[in-house]
Image (cartoon, grey):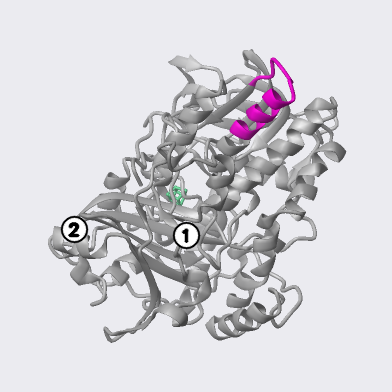
Amino acid sequence: MQPRLTSLNAPNIEREELPVDVLLVGAGPASLACAIHLQRLFESKGIEEKTILVIDKAEEIGNHTLSGAVMDPKGIAELFPNWKDDGFPILSEVREDWAEMLKPGGGSRAMKGAFCPPQLRNHGNYMVSLNQVCRWMSEKAEAAGIEIYGGFPAAETIFDDSGKRVLGVVTRDSGIAKDGSQKGTFEPGMNITADVTVFAEGTRGSLAKNLDRKLGLSKGKNPQSWGTGIKEIWQVDPAIGKEWFGKVMHTGAYPLKRDAYGGSFVYGIAEDKLALGFVVGLDHKDAKLDPHALFVQWKQHPRIRPLLEGGKVLRYGAKTIPEGGYFSMPKLYGDGFVQVGDTAGFVDIAKLKGIHLAIKSGMLAAEAICAAIEKGDTSEASLKKYDDLFEASWAKEELWKTRNYRQAFAKGMFTGMLDFGVAMVTGGRGLVGKRGGHADHTTMEPVSKSTFELPQFNDNDSLDKLTDVYHSGAIHEEDQPAHLLINDPSICGEKCTKEYGNPCQHFCPAAVYEWPGGNSEVVINASNCVHCKTCDIADPYENIEWLVPEGGGGPKYLDM
Ligand code: SF4
């Protein structure tokens, strides 16, 4: 049994203090855009000797960053007007795009040109690897004088005595053994303090989650709603690769049932490579639903399977996507802090895009931070400027148009499609001015109602979870406390087994949770974890807590 820790850091340890002016937690596109824009603003205003520090849990910047990814260039073009000449990594411009509804029997119905839903049209967009994008942006940031530390996971937020003002973060201790004792390699984490802390942890940030709970940042908002996205990169037959290079196909329907929200894609990212992805909303009701198994089933559809003949998987990854939209975004600011990117829900789920919004959120936050530091006031009232700037920006305009999109689909495909049609002619209002939402973990029905069946696996396209995890490059120090904490183990064995059949063994796309036959206790294979955060969101009792593992642990999403 794992030790019952409430924190992965050792208590009462003397820690090195590192004061900076602005601390950014996470090194995704929102964070790096914020740091770069802020540095430029400081320089343009003659504000000197300000330290901007970016920390990330991944050893190398970009290793934990995953996305589809077809990028709307609006954000990057605003940050780097000469982005293309500057060597920004593009896999391909989108040459052709369409959507297809897959039929269970094997056929499909294509929607092209004017018949393709407008939100899925991608002319003018670019296929990218977000891993490469983050590496490129981090090089730009470092060249501009910004400090970036990889392998520094932020474990706790530091507050002032009032408990309301954020002072910075404590990074994760390293060298703690599985039993909680200190090993010879023990290194205490640092206290990094800052005038402003930028939470840019990506989807379901572990610090942002607790910040939200402590300060009530989502009060009056819809609960955030997530989907789990799974992606593989395939090396394919060159004839297929050449035919598909530059093409973007989104598919819907099969194998999802009508009450589950989701979709899938095939992107021709190189003359010999395809990116394949599958997303399913975590508000589905089925306790046995397994997103990875659905992905396998989808790959076996006659529309997809021939594309993979003779090919092999190169990479695998999974992440959750905040899908809730405008009404699910938490308060973006507070005393001494702001939230940006996926952490703050900057995703247009109707278009399946967030990179441009993440970059814009970072830039808007930078403007507010610069103004606050210039006047020596980084209070909540001063940082509200970030929210004001957002409300007046194209990012708000875009998110406002789809403000009810995901909540309407939660009522079923028919309501979703009808509402979206009405929303297009009512500026996003749809059938209802503001739709309410529900927390994903509340939607699961008892396992006795499950109708989910595992697909037949075959040798070529149906990789099992463990083989896929191998392709994610996930690795963690084995002798450390599991970073997946079960708050009350008795719930798992006594309640969850009977009510929901321990759904963690199904919804985790990396085979982390196992219930070996006859055992009444879960086995946690924490080193398989690809940091998708599904378990932290979907567990029906909210009994699983994802905390940062020791520095550097996690997937390696190279070129994904
Ligand atoms: Fe995702 Fe949780 Fe599984 Fe890790 S343990 S891969 S965060 S579901």
Compared with 553, 400 (above or below) is below
Distance between the alpha carbons at the discs numbered 2 and 1: 25 Å
- Residue 314 disc label: none
Residue shown at 58% from the left, 41% from the top: 79
- Residue receiving disc 2: 236
Q: Does the magenta stretch include residue 37?
A: yes
- The residue depicted at 34 percent of the width and 75 percent of the height is 453
Image location (x, y in percent) of residue 388 = 80, 49
Quadrant assignment, res 415: bottom right
- Residue 420: x and y in percent read 60, 79
Q: Is mark 1 within 8 Å of ligand 1?
A: yes
The quarter holding residue 104 reads: bottom left
Residue 370 falls inside the magenta stretch: no
Depth order, front residue of 360/150? 360
In the rendering, which numbered label is found on residue 228? 1
Residue 8 visible to an observer of this rendering: no
> Looking at this view, is 188 or 314 the one in front?
314
* Residue 483, position as x, y percentages in the image: 49, 38
Does dot 1 land on a helix, a strand or a loop? strand
Q: How crowded is mark 1: few (under 14 residues within 10 Å), some or many (20 or more)?
A: many
SS for dot 2: loop
Q: Residues in magenta?
A: 35-51
